[in-house]
Image: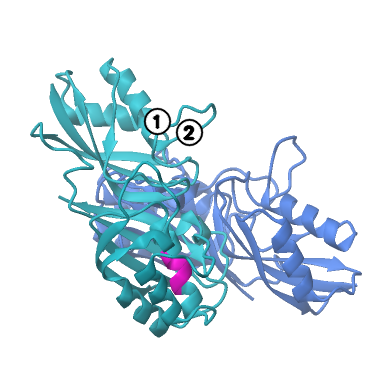
Chain colours: A blue, B cyan
Amino acid sequence: MKNIRITVEYDGTPYSGWQRQNRKGCVTVQGEIESALGMILQEKISLAAAGRTDKGVHAKAQIANFSTASPMDLSRMVHSLNALLPDTIRITDPLEMPKEFHSRHSARERHYRYFLIAEPSAIYGRFSGCSFGTPDLAVMQQVAGSVRGVHDFSAFSREDRDSPGRLCTVTACQWYRYQHFLVLSISANRFLRSMVRYLVDGMLRAGKGTLSAEEFKRMLETGVMTTQLNPVAPSGLFLWRVTY
Amino acid sequence: MKNIRITVEYDGTPYSGWQRQNRKGCVTVQGEIESALGMILQEKISLAAAGRTDKGVHAKAQIANFSTASPMDLSRMVHSLNALLPDTIRITDPLEMPKEFHSRHSARERHYRYFLIAEPSAIYGRFSGCSFGTPDLAVMQQVAGSVRGVHDFSAFSREDRDSPGRLCTVTACQWYRYQHFLVLSISANRFLRSMVRYLVDGMLRAGKGTLSAEEFKRMLETGVMTTQLNPVAPSGLFLWRVTY
């Protein structure tokens, strides 16, 4: 058996997230790739991935891997795969890996970016969230600084019975301006469910003056969501890169 | 009667172009806006626009105008309009204009941009065309130079019985690099049907060495398509700006 790693870029808009679901009419990125690979390789394929992105979240470079007995040449396989897949999913960089490699367990860090635009836009809206006005970037930057380090991120996530433990080590968290966008770049060893979108909501509220930096920090320290946060739109979020 | 001018941004992907069509199941940008305006103003509204973009072509700032007897406040009207319209169409900058103003006839220049990316991309593909490799930018730039001026663009357009005359005055035509993209910026007093997409196909063929700069120029001079050109994908084209 060969262990094949692939890089997956997707526009998450039309998908119910990464993870295969057995509900009818639920189209997922994993499901689309597994079914296309199954046709090409004439085997049942099961994909592992570095990050299970939520419904509507995009990926610039998701990493996945699978086992196959097929002797098919990798570049030919990827060519067929891209021909079968919808335009909103692209596969690149196939690599044969040692059998120990696992796209999720071997990953050391995940890097996400969140793009915010000040006003609704018919064009930029597909790949950004909207701040409806201009938040104070200096305040957001200050709050972002407090996110770095090891914290229990319970106050900034959905419940998720599948993944135990709530501690994450955030190694980078900062905002920068890019064209019309404010962009959050955040890296951690792991992320809880919807964590980036809850954090962006909290930082945005701080930047707009409706949540104090102190209360944000208190939620980070206590793990209790004392102010109701709502995850910002998935359209602005990208799984940007995975480090092994 | 008031003459109202609006700016329209749209992601053209889901639309059969700007122009209203009476065929069933044909959703157009003009049709969507007219029907939303009709509901808000309780009148039959008819829109004129600076450029009739083709199926799948986007607009950063299309300009349209319409007459109405309604006394409704303009910012309230635009607010209701954006609430009714799909996210892929956004209206901004409503202005009451003198009754002589006509978004098509009064326009002096249209500015289009075409975005090309070297490899297919799940994310960038929605708003770009693909060159499948790296063309020679210097050659494309040289050919672009020959496009400037007054020419009969018959060799670079679809037949169009609605608009007589084939002469256009191109005042700017140049390529530049922008992030992952090669971008064509082109301005003219008018454009024939699909003209930018035929021109990009010709320039791209020149940049890839499958069409000589001489033959491109000959087609510009004679108005005869001696080499078969195919309009590049509409996904890369934006009506960028209109000058009055």
Residue A86 in the image, given as x and y percentages of width and height: 66, 53
Q: Is B202 within the magenta?
A: yes
Q: Amino acid at mark 2?
A: Val
- Residue shown at 30% from the left, 70% from the top: B173
Residue A138 in the image, given as x and y percentages of width and height: 25, 61
Viewer-side residue, B242 vs B219? B219
SS for dot 1 = helix
Residue beneath label 1, please? B32
Viewer-side residue, B106 vs A114? B106
Residue B38 in the image, given as x and y percentages of width and height: 32, 20
Characterize the local packing of mark 2: few (<14), some (14-19) or many (20 or more) Cα atoms within 10 angstroms: some
Q: Main secondary structure of the magenta part?
A: helix
SS for dot 2 = loop
Q: Which residues are magenta?
A: B199-203
Viewer-side residue, B136 vs B226? B226
Q: Please state the chain letter of the residue tagged with numbered disc 2 in the rendered image.
A: B
In this image, B240 relative to A85: left or right? left
Q: Which mark is residue B27?
A: 2
Q: Which label's residue is closer to the chain start, 2 or 1?
A: 2
Q: CA distance from mark 2 to mark 1?
A: 7 Å
Q: Please state the chain letter of the residue tagged with numbered disc 1 in the rendered image.
A: B
**Residue at the far top in the pictured view:** B42
Q: Is residue A108 visible?
A: yes
The N terminus of chain A: image quadrant = bottom right
